[in-house]
Image: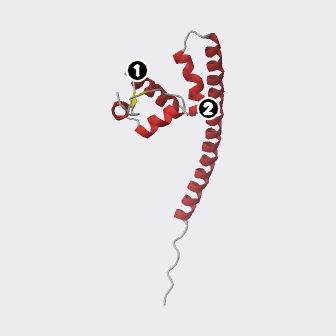
């Protein structure tokens, strides 16, 4: 299938599909006219790539992980992939910890702002000045 059809079937823009190819995440064959042609398996491949991007992985990390899918019986590939996945998991855990700290700091500000708003709402109304 050509790039437009793959784009429609996956919901991924042609520009992104070309990027995936540039990064070595996706492959195509070329027609004599230079048009990209993808196999039906590319639909599942693009879906997997999207899932990995959605999980926060970079294209560099995805390129490290994908060979495990492509060559599942190779112990060296499996070990390298495991190491990359553990690094990513550690990165995500650190991101989560940072987000929790940020949320907690924001909660402190929200409580302070709530108290301040309550104080302002119970304060007497300003007296109108006569002219």
- What residue sits 34% from the left and 30% below the top? 9
In the depicted structure, whether residue 77 falls above or below residue 107: above
| Residue with the most extreme front position | 32
Whole-percent x and y of residue 30? 42, 29
Instruction: Say whether residue 16 is left or right of residue 119.
Output: left
In the depicted structure, whether residue 106 falls above or below residue 36: below
Q: Which residue is mark 1?
A: 41
Along the line of sight, which residue is nearer the eye, 101 or 128? 101
Residue 38 visible somewhere in the drawing: yes
- What residue sits 65% from the left and 39% below the top? 98
- What residue sits 51% from the left and 72% below the top? 125
Give the CA distance from mark 2 to mark 1: 29 Å
**In terms of image quadrants, where is residue 47?**
top left
Instruction: Say whether residue 128 is left or right of residue 36.
Output: right
In this rendering, which labeled residue sits more in front, label 2 or label 1?
1
In the depicted structure, whether residue 52 falls above or below residue 72: below
In the depicted structure, whether residue 56 falls above or below residue 107: above
**In terms of image quadrants, where is residue 6?**
top left
Residue 92 tag number = 2
Instruction: Say whether residue 71 is left or right of residue 4.
Output: right
Helix, strand or loop status at disc 1: helix
């Amino acid at each position: 299938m050509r790039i437009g059809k793959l784009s429609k079937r996956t919901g991924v823009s042609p520009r992104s599909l070309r990027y995936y190819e540039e990064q070595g995440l996706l492959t195509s064959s070329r027609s004599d006219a230079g048009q990209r042609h993808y196999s039906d398996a590319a639909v599942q491949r693009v879906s997997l790539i999207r899932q990995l991007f959605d999980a926060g992985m970079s294209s560099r990390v995805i390129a490290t992980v994908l060979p495990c899918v492509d060559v599942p019986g190779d112990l060296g590939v499996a070990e390298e992939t495991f190491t990359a996945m553990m690094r990513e998991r550690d990165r995500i855990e650190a991101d989560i910890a940072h987000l929790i700290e940020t949320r907690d700091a924001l909660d402190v500000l929200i409580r302070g702002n709530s108290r301040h708003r309550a104080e302002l709402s119970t304060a007497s109304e300003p007296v109108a000045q006569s002219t």
